[in-house]
Image (spheres, rainbow, N blue to C red):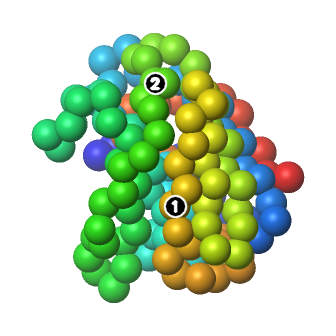
Amino acid sequence: MNKGMIIKNMSFKVGQTLTVVGVPKPDATNFALNIGPDEKEITMHINPRFNAHGDENAVVCNSYQKGSWCEEYREGGFPFHQGEEFKIIIEFTPTEFQVTLSDGSQIHFPNRMGAEKYSYISFDGEVHVTSFEIK
């Protein structure tokens, strides 16, 4: 997957909301948003897949811990369209990430690492991020 934007040494804490707006490339197969303590550990990986890894029009969530992927998690709709703007809103609670997609569908993904603050966010794949905000 293409390495995209990386944000390090920032603070995404329990009680905050992350809002991301972007546009998948017109020929995108998939892209990902990763949140974690650093580039080696990912507590939340959101991977909208148009046609990748054997999936079509699916949002796959997971965590990458101690050098391997955990159990995949699939929930919510698929409001993504190649070449069209999307919005992902992530509310960070002590126990989970409450993700709201553009169509209003939700994903409740557990905070598997249990931390109250993460300092690394990255975007990979075929996407152009136009807005990024933590409140």
Residue 31 on image: x %, y %: 39, 39
Task: Name the disc covering residue 80, or none.
Answer: 2
| As drawn, 40 above or below 101 | below
Amino acid type indicated by mark 2: Phe
Q: Secondary structure at mark 1?
A: strand
Q: Is residue 36 visible?
A: no
Q: Secondary structure at mark 2?
A: loop
**CA–CA distance in space, label 1 to label 2:** 19 Å
**Residue found 72% across the figure and 67% down from its top:** 93
Residue 78 occupies quadrant: top left
**Residue found 76% across the figure and 70% down from its top:** 14
Residue 132 on image: x %, y %: 71, 41
Task: Name the disc covering residue 109, or none.
Answer: 1
Amino acid type indicated by mark 1: Phe
Task: Name the disc covering residue 57, or none.
Answer: none
Residue 131 occupies quadrant: top right
| As drawn, 17 above or below 77 | below
Looking at the image, tell me whether mark 1 or mark 2 is earlier in sequence order.
Answer: 2
Horizontally, residue 23 falls left or right of residue 20, namely: left
Q: Is residue 65 visible?
A: yes
